[in-house]
Image (cartoon, helix red, strand yellow):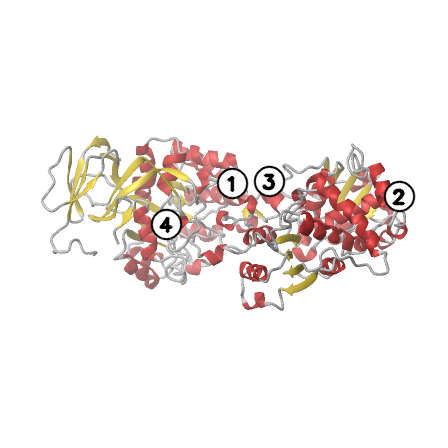
Amino acid sequence: MSGFPRNLLGIDDLGPDGIAEVLRVTDSFVEVAHRANPKVPALRGRTVATLFFEDSTRTRVSFETAAKRLSADVLSFAAGSSSVKKGESLRDTVETIEAMGIDAVIIRHSSSGAPIQVARWVPDTAVVNAGDGWHEHPTQALLDCYTVRQALLGRDADDAGDDPTDVAGALDGDDGIGGFKGLRVVIVGDIRHSRVARSQVAAYAALGAEVTLVAPRTLLPPSLDGWPVASVSHHLDRELADADVVSLLRVQSERGSGEFVPSLREYTAGYGLTARRAAMLRPDTLILHPGPMVRGVEIASEVADLPAARITGQVSNGVAVRMAVLFLLLTQGPTEGSLHA
Amino acid sequence: MPERSVDGDARMVIVRGGTVVDATGERRADVVVGGDRVLSVGPDLDVPAGADVLEADGCVVAPGLVDLHTHLREPGHEEAETVETGTRAAALGGFTAVVAMPNTTPPLDSADAVRNVLELGRTATAEVAVAGAITVGRAGERLAPMAELAALGVRLFTDDGAGVQSAGLMRRALEYARGLGVTLAQHCEDGSLACDGAMHEGAWSSRLGIPGMPALAEEVMVARDIALARATGARVHFLHLSTVGSIDLVRRAKAEGVPVTAESAPHHFTLTDACTAGYDPVFKVNPPLRPDDDVEAVKLGLEDGTVDAIATDHAPHAPEAKDLPFDQAPPGMLGLQTALALAVTELRLPIARLLALLSWQPAAIAGLDGQGGPVEAGSAANLVVVDPTATWTVDPFALASRSRNTPYAGRTLTGRVRHTVFRGEPVVVDAEAQR
């Protein structure tokens, strides 16, 4: 096996084959999670650093748990408690971390592109983008794809006893991976300011799904030139009956997206997944939300608790997906071999 | 005044074997300079005793270039540039005059601040003219003491880095400026449209997730100021125009006879917003790099005379400032040493037209006597000798600026400044700075 990239900065680094590889490897790590000792020695002796310049509980804990279950040593840098607070630049910070001999840096930053700059500054360290500004959040999109695939395979994390590769193999035909070909995915919400949306669009499209974006014009990116989307709509009601997956995005009022709609009430009226709208979905339509959810705004509380809503399933799959990413980057990527030479 | 020669006599220089090009035309001629004046221009002149000989075979000898838009950073940001290093870069780029922008710390909004920069410029290797601020602190709230600054020789006023947001205040400034005979230069950017944009708003900003600044932010202010210039009769100079719409507005305003002039920067006719794909802040500039059609419009504007001048917007930033995440890094790129070569390399114009855009037209806009030629007996000895066919490769570490933020690193360009004569002194000889 070869061709896994050095870094995971955006979904395009992986391509359809790379995404498929992550999803397949995730299957094995989902299994690991169900063992009495959910730990494998795959990355024993390797060191992974998380460098979070933006608050995030779930993503950081998910990555750190993933690294620990792979037996890697984990260093945790928080912008608030490190020398960053004393005025050290991002470049100096990551170069210092690289000098410590770290194998992978997992970075979250409020500036789009920061992980890409970091990857240029530390060319011998694998860099994983854990969310940068409005740009990308690739592991979240991989997690969403995995969750969709899991549902398509007709199983969930509770009955992982069967060999999942048999089922997956049956679905992973010439038509794409795990039945994504032609799947109708509707992404609703603040796409303009969403790194999750950019990664989701790239990932779903790479797997052959047909993506529809639904948002008021003000919450769409200024230009969709070159975006691999099948359609754009401003009328959520019209998109629901045909949807296989409805993926909701949070209205990021802390990023000022509140100024892009007259009020949250008006947003919910037009774009919230209310109980009325949920009733327009087919029974097997999946509802995804990358969290954190704002119940009552983009999703009604009773809808979030429906069996079709895979919100907590997404969280538990997150660790396995991130294990797969770290495992593949550090054992199959081009850095392997050069790191400890 | 700088020393003219070691023995105290007026220095003599002969520029020999070149083609003189100025606003009056082209001719094969030698140029003899004595002191700070051109003494004679003609074919096959005798070399005066003791004269420095500057060979110009195959070269164009022209009035020194004039940059309407230079950030010298002094006072306040000497880590990025000083008057000394900036004017050395200017001389190496063929410029014998630069207009220093007022966004220093403190800003050039008072007589003391202007006097300080003029004083720093007295020993520089190019003339340092000062653009004064239109408003106090460049804050856009009340007028700076324009008459007091005009009395010190300030001919151009701008809040560059920011546009004057209030139409009412801009109107008042224009009315006041008209009485003083000075020109207001606008950085066209409507803040309510530009918001926190860090690059051009379009396909690339959308993909990269970087807040965008729409072309509209520039165009609405160009349109507004054309209306104000028409109404007040005061002259407006538009800084660094970069969009199809802006250039079209100026083209129509000029056809109508509205008193407006315009400049564009080399990066706006050579680079597109696709350059930002790798999030390298060396490509962050304001106005931002734009798509292909805007780049083409800038070229056409320069070619058809809509745009009067190529101005560098030379904006040095220390390496640590450009090593920040894209949205946090300051906008701006170096320009003085690459402007002429980029014009020669990228524009579809004969050298005489390029020199008009780089020398006598900007000299007229800036109101600088003794700059922009013509090259004739008795005129000020500010000259550039250009080899229009020589090629060279841009090396950021070989530039004279204190900063390294050129977006052209590694690019091979055609057209090289061979010599620069400033007030009779050869400040650049064979592409080497002499001091």
Of B270 and B397, nearer the camera is B397
Q: Residue B309 appears in which quarter of the rendering?
A: top left
> On the image, numbered disc 3 is attached to which residue?
B203
Marks 1 and 3: CB-CB under 8 Å? no
Please, what is the three-letter code of the amino acid marked with disc 2?
Gly
Label 4: which residue? B398
| Helix, strand or loop at mark 2 | loop
Identity, as a three-letter code, of the amino acid under mark 1: Arg
Q: Amino acid at mark 4?
A: Ala
The residue under label 2 is: A154
Q: Which residue, as the protein is rendered here, is positioned at the far front?
A: A341
Say if labels 4 and 1 share a chain: yes
Viewer-closest of B101 and A59 = A59
The answer to which of B319 and B174 lies nearer the viewer is B319
| Dot label at residue B290 | 1
Report whether A24 appears left or right of A122.
right
